């Protein structure tokens, strides 16, 4: 038998194996190349869309916070002060705290740089809640401190007005109140009237104090 023909299939198989290996390697390298190109493109797109990474400003913000502070300002309040304090409290004793709102308002305007004269401030305190009992003369011994504070403010020009409807509910007449008290027909109508006259309305909110300042500051 001729050896050429017996060796020919073997050579063919070797050549087929060689070309198959080359194709496989080429395919693998091609896949890797495609993968590298894709990753690079994705990275470039991400940089373009997201922009440069944000710089950490923590140190800068901390520095600013340490080097800055709040600023005191002096609001240019008008000399023409028209205000109505509406007292409508669920407990008579809360009038002590409500009067602090009045004191805070007046003290600020009477102090520098405003130096307003209290007699020229138009201030009304409208009373139509349970605190009405503090103005009854028969209860003076119980609410003496509050009554004297209100009398002091009345001497500075503050008007204390009591709702007539509320007085009727408690069975009070004009003779039952102290002499600095003025009785008006209705608290509701008073509120509407003075607001149409340009008066600002302040309603003191009095809550039970559960913590000291030192506990929560």
Image (cartoon, rainbow, N blue to C red):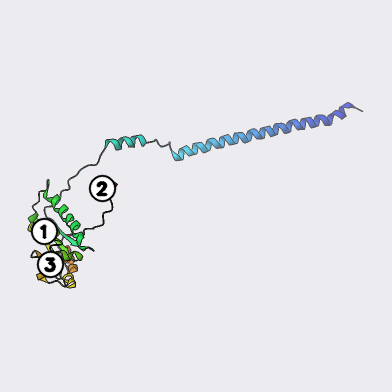
For the point 59% across and 36% down, the residue is 35
Mark nearer the N terminus (2 vs 3): 3
For label 2, the crowd category at 10 Å Cα-Cα, with few meaning under 14, some 14 to 19 and many 20 or more, is few
Query: Mark 1 highlights which residue?
Result: 148
Marks 1 and 3 in Cβ contact (< 8 Å): no
Marks 2 and 3 in Cβ contact (< 8 Å): no
In the visual, does 74 lie left or right of 24? left
For the point 76% across and 32% down, the residue is 17
Q: Is residue 129 visible?
A: no
User: Looking at the rendered structure, which numbered label has been put on residue 138?
Assistant: 3
| Quarter location, residue 3 | top right
Mark nearer the N terminus (1 vs 2): 1
Q: Nearer the viewer, mark 2 or mark 3?
A: 3
Q: Nearer the viewer, mark 1 or mark 3?
A: 3
Mark nearer the N terminus (1 vs 3): 3
Q: Please name whichever residue, 110 or 205, is drawn nearer the observer in this view of the structure.
A: 205
In the visual, does 47 lie left or right of 189? right
**Which residue, as the protein is rendered here, is positioned at the far top?**
3
**Which residue, as the protein is rendered here, is positioned at the far front?**
141
Q: Please name whichever residue, 168 or 12, is drawn nearer the observer in this view of the structure.
A: 168
For the point 9% across and 70% down, the residue is 175
Please state the horizontal and vertical placement of residue 51, each as a whole percent of the image: 43, 38
């Amino acid at each position: 038998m001729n050896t050429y023909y017996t060796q020919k299939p073997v050579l063919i198989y070797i050549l087929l194996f060689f070309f198959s290996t080359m194709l496989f390697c080429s395919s693998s390298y091609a896949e890797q190349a495609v993968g590298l190109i894709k990753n690079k493109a994705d990275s470039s797109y991400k940089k373009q869309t997201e922009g440069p990474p944000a710089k950490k400003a923590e140190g800068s913000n901390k520095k600013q916070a340490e080097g800055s502070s709040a600023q005191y300002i002096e609001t240019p309040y008008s000399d023409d002060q028209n205000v109505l304090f509406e007292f409508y409290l669920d407990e008579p004793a809360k009038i002590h705290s409500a009067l602090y709102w009045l004191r805070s308002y007046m003290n600020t305007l009477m102090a520098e740089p405003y130096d307003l004269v209290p007699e020229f401030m138009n201030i009304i305190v409208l009373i139509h809640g349970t605190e009405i009992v503090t103005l009854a003369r028969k209860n003076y011994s119980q609410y003496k401190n509050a009554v004297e504070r209100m009398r002091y403010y009345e001497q500075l020009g503050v008007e204390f007005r009591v709702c007539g409807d509320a007085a009727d509910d408690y069975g009070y007449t004009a003779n039952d109140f102290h002499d600095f008290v003025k009785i008006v027909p209705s608290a509701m109508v008073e509120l509407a009237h003075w607001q149409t006259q340009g008066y600002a309305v302040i309603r003191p909110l009095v809550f039970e104090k559960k913590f000291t300042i030192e506990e929560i500051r």
